[in-house]
Amino acid sequence: MENSASKILERAIDQFALLPGVGRRTALKYALSIIKRGDSEVTRFLNAISALKTDLHSCSVCHNICEDDMCEICKNPRRDKSTICVVENIKDILAIERTGQFRGVYHVLGGVISPIDAIGPNDLNIASLLARLQNEKVEEIIFALSATVEGDSTAFYISKKIPAELNIKLSAIAKGISVGNELDYTDELTLGKSIINRTLFK
């Protein structure tokens, strides 16, 4: 493609194709859709994308995404602050919230311990979780990590770092989730039951 319009289209396709799960054929559909939209629609689209980088922050308490210093869940007085659900990423919060079965608060680790990927405890938000346990009245921690060796190892590591004198109940979501599955790929009914039927962490 030699004309400048084609080069512009190719650059747009290249950028869309960088998104997870988007191949070049789908990227082409996205680019052509943008071309067909009106100017005001495209402006709103671009502003929304730009705001993701300029206006979103990490919650100072739980590391969820938010527009202010603290996320809406942490600010909500109706949430049970005594129960913290520990998750790997923000997608897991969205998945659990869709079930409507959890009224506590969250803590986003930002991943799991994975030596093969050179991810250690210091690369995750574990220190801030342990600080919350010292500063807040927490009665239960629910580990809602992926059903993998890495997820289990991360939960085990954290459990050993929690001082026994805090008398915090440790539990894990029930194993209704297949081994190796991520929470956001689990249907809402199964995930909801896994939270309700959580078991003591051993």
Image (spheres, rainbow, N blue to C red):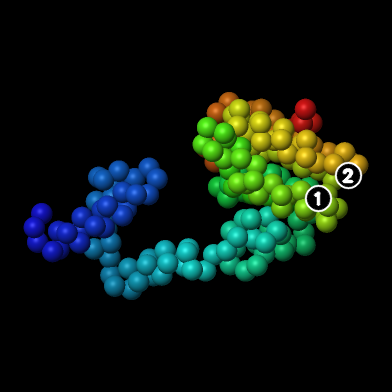
* Residue annotated with mark 2: 166
- Going by the numbered disc 1, the residue's amino acid type is Leu
Q: Position of residue 119 (x, y in %)?
A: 57, 40
Is tag 2's residue or tag 1's residue first in the polypeptide sequence?
A: 1
Q: Position of residue 146 (x, y in %)?
A: 60, 34
Whether residue 169 sits left or right of residue 120 in the image: it is right
Q: Is residue 20 visible?
A: yes
Foreground residue among 22 and 131:
131
When the figure is inspected, residue 43 is found, relative to residue 157, above or below; the finding is below
Q: Secondary structure at mark 1?
A: helix
Q: CA distance from mark 2 to mark 1?
A: 8 Å
Q: Residue at x 77, y 27 (%)?
A: 202
State which quadrant residue 57 falls in.
bottom right
When the figure is inspected, residue 102 is found, relative to residue 45, above or below; the finding is above
Q: Secondary structure at mark 2?
A: helix
Q: Position of residue 198 (x, y in %)?
A: 74, 33
**Label 2: few (<14), some (14–19) or many (≥20) C-alpha neighbours in 10 Å:** few
Foreground residue among 196 and 68:
68
Task: Locate the N terminus by quadrant.
Answer: bottom left
**Label 1: few (<14), some (14–19) or many (≥20) C-alpha neighbours in 10 Å:** some
State which quadrant residue 118 falls in.
top right
Whether residue 78 sits left or right of residue 126 in the image: it is right
* Residue annotated with mark 1: 133
**Mark 2 touching mark 1, by CB under 8 A?**
yes
- Going by the numbered disc 2, the residue's amino acid type is Leu
State which quadrant residue 113 falls in.
top right
Q: Position of residue 170 (x, y in %)?
A: 79, 37
When the figure is inspected, residue 71 is found, relative to residue 131, above or below; the finding is below
